[in-house]
Image (spheres, grey):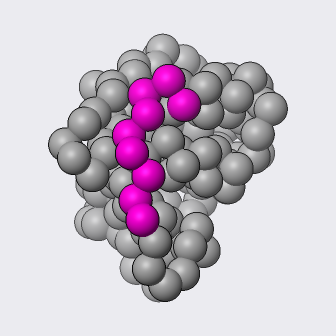
Amino acid sequence: MSKAIENLESAQQRAMAGRPKAGGFPYLAETLRSAGVTRNLWSLPACQSLYLTQMGPVVQQGTPLITGMADVPQFDRDALITALRSDQSGESTFPEFLMAAWKAGVVSYDVDFIARNVTYYGSGGESYVESYAAVSSRA
């Protein structure tokens, strides 16, 4: 196992242990940023996550949301914002958020830990950017 993977896994464990149920993403993000993670690029529905870190890039393959062929949902900004607010209030799990984002037409998203924002993309070039507040890492 590389030092980059060890560092990322350790940061993820610290982040999940210290993040509150509601409004926890900024704490997760700050813990990863403090560990040298600069970006996190997600591909939906594959649930592939590429972490760009100061120690080197690391890919993490999650459980895909779908298998086989499927029509890509049309980008729906309002549905995405509803999914975000549900996640932020602790009313959904992360897998539920990912599925809701996919159903809202999100095919990828880019978390910029330095700029503290997340850009969500649809298949037709649509995008929605949401910033998050700087917080102190709880881990």
Is residue 77 visible in the rendered structure shown here? yes
136, 122: nearer the viewer: 122
The answer to whether 76 is drawn above or below residue 39 in the figure is: above
Residue drawn at x 19%, y 43% is 125
User: Could you say which quadrant of the image residue 21 lies in?
Assistant: top right
Measured from the top left, where is residue 115 in percent x and y? 28, 25
The answer to whether 72 is drawn above or below residue 34 in the figure is: below
The answer to whether 14 is drawn above or below residue 22 in the figure is: below
Residue drawn at x 54%, y 81% is 67
Q: State how many labels appear.
A: 0
72 in magenta: yes
66, 56: nearer the viewer: 66
37 in magenta: no
Residue extending farthest to the left is 125
**Horizontal side, residue 86 vs residue 4: left or right:** right
Measured from the top left, where is residue 23 in percent x and y? 68, 23
33, 131: nearer the viewer: 131
Is residue 42 visible in the rendered structure shown here? no
Measured from the top left, where is residue 25 in percent x and y? 59, 32
Measured from the top left, where is residue 137 in percent x and y? 59, 28
**Horizontal side, residue 26 vs residue 24: left or right:** left
37, 82: nearer the viewer: 82
Main SS category, magenta section: loop
User: Could you say which quadrant of the image residue 135 lies in?
Assistant: top right
User: Could you say which quadrant of the image residue 114 lies in?
Assistant: top left
The quarter of the rendered structure image containing the C terminus is: top right
Question: In this picture, which residue range is highlighted in magenta?
Answer: 71-79
Residue drawn at x 67%, y 55% is 95
Residue drawn at x 33%, y 28% is 128
